[in-house]
Amino acid sequence: MSSRTRYFLIGSSLVVVVGLCTGLVAYYNGSAPAGAAARLPDLAYLPADASAVAYADVKDIMASEFRQRLREALPTGAEKDRFLAETGIDIEHDIDSVLAGLNRDARDPRNAVILFRGRFDTAHIEALAAEHGAVTEQYKGKKILLAPQTISASPAGPSSAIAFLEPGLLAIGSQADLHAAIDAPSAPGSITANAQLMDLVAGAQQSGNAWMVGRFDAMAMQPNMPVQIRSQMPAVEWFAVSADIDRGVRGTVRAETRDEQGADQLRSVVNGGLSAARMFAGNDARVTQVLNGLQATGTGTTVQITFALGPETLDMLKGAMAQTPLVPPAIAK
Amino acid sequence: MSDAPAPIAPAPPPVADAPRRPSPPGLMTGALRIFDMSIGQMLWSRRTVFMALVVGVPVVIAVALRVMVELGAPIMRSGRSPISGGVVFGLMMWGFYVRFAAPVLAVFYGTSLIADEVEDKTLTYLFTRPIPRSAVLLGKYFAYLVCTIGVVLPSVMLVWLLIASLNDTLGNTFLSLVKDLGILATGLAVYGAVFALVGAVVRRPLLVGLGLVFGWETIALALPGFMKRLSVAFYLQGLVPHAMPADSPVAVLQTFFQQSISLPQSLLSLAAIAVVSLWLAARAVSRREYVLEQ
């Protein structure tokens, strides 16, 4: 074997070995969890005991055709204006994305930390908070603005607080939740260590610009969860809901059951429900069109329902809403 | 008279043994010698330029993709959802390497293992060496394997390093890479053995080989029944059936008729195809009388 052949083979082997070693190091530094966390680094601020995670790519959704159509159909803005007046944040223009982590004790829906990624006028927000009587606290080098009891009617709850975790990253939650969020990246207790949840997050990230994943038992404790759903789905362990909002809405609802038997039963219930809905829909074109976009699939312990609302469906629903008054005439009188 | 002792006559020189002929090398030793001689010839031939082109195109595409993403082009999105680099890498692996590069390189190299020596009229020099004829084929097959793996695998590695980290992490796709490298090496080995057999027994091996790759291997997968079991692609597909993209009518048809085959079954079948093909090729080379045209 000539020396140049030998050098070529050594060089070729080196490329393969160096690549494999790089991959091996990357793999042992965290595989699936790091995949989701790499795409969404803000996950590191959610504490490990969070039972559910929700995300919305606000910038993407605000720019979507669906949102423009929805705004034509439902011209609301009171909540947005109130949020702007109280916090100085314009949801439509200042925020790129929202990430929320619901704590394990999910009976209180306000028991969550919400992270806003975007462009914030820190001085303006601090001045507004000071006007409302907020108290400033320093925790591990981060500034937290604690709301007084007088503004307890704010959306974040009675003990609401605001913290600037990074430039362009603002967190809202209770004082304890914000402390936990500040602790999470340095402590080994970040949610990114929860491999099963991160696996679901990674899947949801692939399928839409708005999603929510979590433990179903934690969500079932929510007081506003219908009792029928809570009692009918004890076998569901994890759930993931994702929606891709663009011209229309394409979404997926996925449930992971504890065993295959539970999944079979749930699939039967879902398919039965869909069949019944189609039967009762009769000749109603609107309902039929919505139902046609629904599909139930899944194998093993997974039950999945996909749905699609095209622009034409939205137009049809918009037309129907225009014909039907929002307040029934009897009540309006 | 002196009593001087008579000089001692020198002892007759020992009768020299007849020069012993070294025993001829065995099959593996002979094959290794042929490998050592052939690897350089194979690596620095014009055929390698073709191989570099085949495996260089995916690298160029990967570089272009990476540069465009770094410059902010929104190409790694499907609608509004991001496309994972691992998915793109998987598609490139199947599209470029497993379904195209491996069989095509195997056709061009495998069919020429013996045919080139016949064409260059140098086969006589190899056959007059004191090694089994089958060692010639085996040594050339090993040289083909090292040569193709030595060129193709670094190309795959570069594509992976460039693409896998887009909207994903290297760690997340590492296991897929290892699996894909294994599948690719297996594909090169099995296809190489099959086309070595074609090259040893068929008069126009290149045409037959291309017909097998682009004709039979594609059609057989779409046929119902047992016919697909007579193709290498069926067993390669059995190694990772989920990775097969269904992006063309033929692929969809293949998915429709797809029969499940387990991983051990696939591995055993591929090993059997490679061993039987090599054995038949070695047998053909040993028995066949090659007529070198003057």
Image: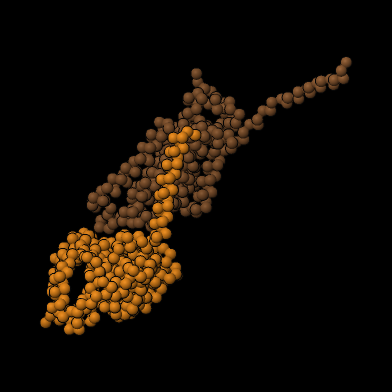
Q: Nearer the viewer, residue B257 or A108?
A: A108
**Residue furthest out toward the top:** B1
Evaluate whether residue A290 shows in this view. no
The residue that appears at 50% across and 26% down in the rendered structure is B118
Evaluate whether residue A230 shows in this view. yes
Can you give x and y, in whole percent of width and height, for residue A174 in the image? 26, 78
| Color encoding of the figure | by chain
To which quarter of the image does residue A200 belong? bottom left
Chain letter of the brown region: B
Q: Nearer the viewer, residue B201 or B192?
A: B192
**Residue furthest out toward the bottom:** A149
Up/down of A282 relative to B250, above or below: below
- Quadrant where the C terminus of chain A sits is bottom left
The residue that appears at 40% across and 53% down in the rendered structure is A22
Up/down of A151 relative to B274, above or below: below
Up/down of B190 relative to B15, above or below: below
